[in-house]
Image (spheres, rainbow, N blue to C red):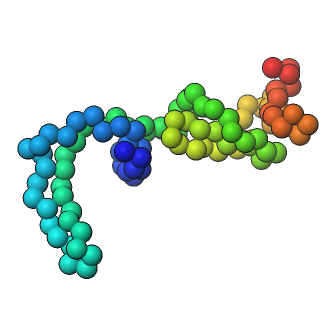
Amino acid sequence: EGLALANYGYVVNVIEVKEEQIRSGIIEYDSGNVVFTVKYTALLLRPFINEVLDATVSICSPLGFFAFVGPLRIFVSKHSMPEDMMNGFDGDKDAWVSDDKE
């Protein structure tokens, strides 16, 4: 858990590890660590480009904002925001506000 796998996504939770899916370990020569090949079932978070996700905003700046989507920290650039928010950074409130103030 907590591991980012390039082709699969972020491992949120390991659901099941079957004992028969654990193979014999191999001892690493340099460190003495034992490496096991294990097959398991896991819950993954794998966001795609332009996917809409629920997020919690953590930091706002004139360049955009940072937010958390579960365990992932993302940045949304002001150039990715709708046109009515392009110039909507309010430094006093430290927030992005649309032209209609909603």
Q: In the figure, is residue 59 to the left or right of 74?
A: right
Number of numbered discs on residues: 0
Front position in the image: 88 or 69: 69
Q: Quadrant of the N terminus?
A: top left
**Up-down: is 29 above or below 71?**
below
Which residue appears farthest toward the bottom when viewing the image?
Answer: 30
Q: Is residue 31 left or right of residue 37?
A: right
Q: Is residue 71 above or below residue 56?
A: below
Residue 100 sits above or below residue 23 on the image: above
Residue located at (20% from left, 78% from top): 29
**Quarter where residue 78 is shown:** top right
- Quadrant housing residue 80: top right
**Residue 102: where, in percent of width, then height?**
81, 20
In the image, what residue occupies the spot 89% across and 40% down? Answer: 91
Please say whether residue 66 is visible from this viewpoint: yes
Residue sitting at the far front? 32
Instruction: Please tell me which residue is depicted at 11% across the width and 54% down the height of the picture.
Output: 23
Please give the name of the residue rendered at 15% of the width and 66% of the height, measured from the top-left corner.
26
**Percent x, y for residue 55?**
60, 31
> Can residue 76 be seen from the camera position used here?
no
Can you say whether 34 is above or below 82 in the image? below
- Residue 18 image position (x, y, % from top left): 14, 39
Q: Which residue occupies the foreground of this view, 40 or 62?
A: 40
Residue 79, x across and y down, in percent: 73, 42
Q: Is residue 53 left or right of residue 86?
A: left
Q: Quadrant of residue 36?
A: bottom left
